[in-house]
Amino acid sequence: MNMTKLVLAGLMSLGLSVPAFAGSFEGVVTMKETSDGEATLKRTYFKGDKMREDHSDGDYMVWDAAKKEGLIVDAKKRTVIVMPWPDVKSVDAKKMFEGTTVTKTGKSDKVSGYTCEIYLSKDQEDNNSSELCVAKGIGNAAMFGIMGGGISGFGGYPAWFRDLVKDGGFPLRHIDRDESGKVESRGDATVEAKRLDESLFAAPAGYTVTDRATMLKQTGEEMRKRPSR
């Protein structure tokens, strides 16, 4: 797995006891990702202790550090599942980053007007490499509490990862290469600082809202009602 995927997966699994982040940035980060000649856009919204991540199919997730819960919105079904953070399974950080070496280059660049620090990684198993340019002061408490589920703060995470995400670190550019050095995928972000309406981080009007426990119970009942084969 390349470092871009590792970092994003790691950000999605930090524990709820992560030290407080300033959360001063408010606005939208739009990442244009290109792979195999195809381009996709991914938008992430930040406001105070809230974060929203849009998916290409119209679905999205909202995470609220103050409430310690998330909303999983299904646009097609017009449903919202409320997900308390402790209900989400944590990951094995040591296993996740095993076999990956990361170097802080000491170099920096600017992406969308924000200074970012450059990190390089190498996967010992497949020799793929990645470059990340990480800006500080964008990620907030919601981002670093997503999918905590029991991991205590940065416990178990390597020192390079702690350095990368501290002070609200957020990747604004990634370049992933195969073992020959050929670029497999690339992402470049556009950062727009602006005031966001609270409705962006709430359940849409008219949608059916269900908590996770109720959803699991309903799913179990539906499965029991199905005729056995």
Image (tube, rainbow, N blue to C red):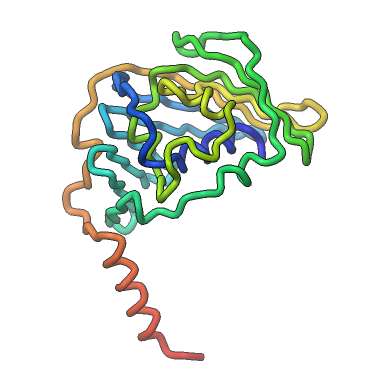
Q: In the rendered view, does 212 fall on the left or right side of 198?
A: right
Give the image quarter of residue 55. Answer: top left
Give the image quarter of residue 99. Answer: top right
Out of 66 and 55, give the one closest to the viewer.
Answer: 66
Q: Residue furthest right?
A: 180
- Name the residue rendered at 33%, 35% in the picture: 142
Out of 162 and 56, give the one closest to the viewer.
Answer: 162
Quadrant in which the N terminus appears:
top right
Give the image quarter of residue 52. Answer: top left
- Name the residue rendered at 24%, 36% in the picture: 200
Out of 182 and 132, give the one closest to the viewer.
Answer: 132
Marker count (numbered): 0
Residue 184, percent from left and from top: 69, 32
- Name the residue rendered at 74%, 33% in the picture: 128
Q: Is residue 98 above or below residue 210?
A: above
Residue 147, percent from left and from top: 41, 46
Q: Residue furthest left?
A: 205
Residue 202, percent from left and from top: 22, 42
Q: In the rendered view, does 45 fall on the left or right side of 189?
A: left
Residue 45, percent from left and from top: 34, 30
- Name the residue rendered at 52%, 34% in the picture: 40
